[in-house]
Image: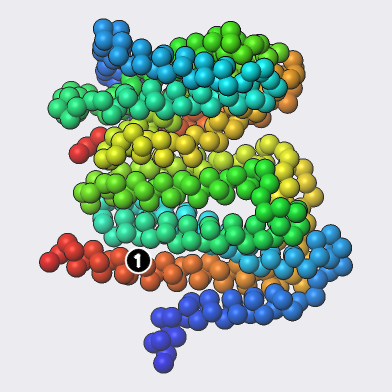
Amino acid sequence: MASFVCFFTFAKNRWMTISSEIKTLLGKEIRLELKQKYVLNGILLYLVSTIFVTYLAFEDVVDVQTWNSLFWIILLFVAVNGISKSFIQESPARHLYYYTIASPQAVLLSKVIYNLILMLILSSLAFVFFLLLMGNRVVNLPLFLLALVLGSFGLSSILTMVAAIASRASHNFSLMAILSFPIVLPLLGVLMKVSASAMTDSQWSGNQGFIVILFTINIAVILLAYLLFPYLWRD
Amino acid sequence: MKEVITKYWWKLLAGILLLYAIIEGFRVDLPPEIVEKIQQTIRNLFFHVGMWFAMFTMLITSFVYSLRYLRKFDPKEDIAAVEAVNVGVLFGFLGIFTGMIWANFTWGSPWTKDPKLNGAAIGLVIYLAYLILRGSIEDVHKRAKVSAVYNIFAFVLWIVFVLVMPRITSGGLHPANKGEANTVMPMNLTASLRVVFYPAMIGWILLATWILNLRIRIGKLKYFLEHEQ
């Protein structure tokens, strides 16, 4: 009983320090981004241009499958581009500074949460542009939005971790793409299935299994990243 | 002679089991209900599935060695991890190749859209990316650490994809998907096939371990020559 209380207070104190660190780091990231708007503008432009290209290329969209695949492929590329900038842009000096002031888990979680916010914004904007240019094919809107949210969670956590791994190697951007695509494919497959059924069917019936998988993948990825990131952090 | 046998018994066993599996695999009588469905191609069972199990064993071994490397940072564990990935990728290619030959005869084309096949292909891409990652880092310790982290991360996600998802999402032609009567799993094989299948599987796994053993020894020698001069 005493050991349980000890563990509980330890966990609570650790959570207090980590959550305050996370809040500070997250605030720093958001403020930096709002000041410069470098990453956000670049990625927004990328998003709009790719959607516009598909709009021009596909004269008369189109069946549900094409809509679905185009949407998720574009979102995937946008995500890889946007999230890779989060780690790879930091200079080594700043990296060392963070190492001395914050715990690795706080750094990782703050980056994941920042990328999650970024992905939520990007995916909703992508959805809006797609509706505008490629027409509305979504029958079951809540299910599709759920897929968007879970997909943003998954993409941000997986890609943040892979960006952390790729940032330790030399040929950063191409390596990021090579490493991330095979790992992200399972998540993308499930997301495509769920959103395809959101476009053909207005019921939720067959999708519980997929949604459970999405949740499980998200939780597993965050746990793994939490445990493994400290090994990447020390140089 | 006795020392030779006690040290190398498992290598001899690998050779004997595989010879037996290859010879008997082509000789054994097939039960009639399988023959009418997929005919003689069921004999590929002794090769394709065995190689698949060998690949799995190698990749699990690599995963364990990566975990052990992160605990103690012993370079031998890192050598073992990368060599296990090498052997695993080799057997993965062999398994996919034999699977494609089999598919061509039974389903009409070498590749179909099926979760298990996708899982196998993605697994291969993941581990090839692992090898590329290793190639892009110069410093030995950093390379070992970063590739160990990637190995653990990618392996867990791959296992979810390859084992869990085909069970949950139905459809596809590959045996052992959800809801399908499973005629080719070991539990359901008739006795005559099981007699050849189990030794074949063990033989392939032992062969993979033998190759791994040799490669680890070569890797250790190379490391010793380069770093302990």
- Residue drawn at x 80%, y 61% as measured from the top left: B38
Q: Is residue A194 visible?
A: no
Q: Position of residue B49 (x, y in %)?
A: 63, 61
Chain at tag 1: B
Front residue of A235 and A166:
A166
Disc 1 marks which residue?
B216
* Count of numbered tags: 1
Q: Position of residue B83 (x, y in %)?
A: 38, 60
Q: Is residue A70 visible?
A: yes
B145 in relation to B49, above or below: above
Dot 1: within a 10 Å radius of its alpha carbon, few (fewer than 14), some, or many (20 or more) residues? many
Mark 1 secondary-structure assignment: helix
Front residue of B135 and A234:
B135
Q: Position of residue B145 (x, y in %)?
A: 29, 46
Specify the amino acid type for callout 1: Ile
Q: Quadrant of the N terminus of chain B?
A: bottom left
Q: Residue furthest left?
A: B229
Is B216 displayed left or right of A71 in the figure?
A: left
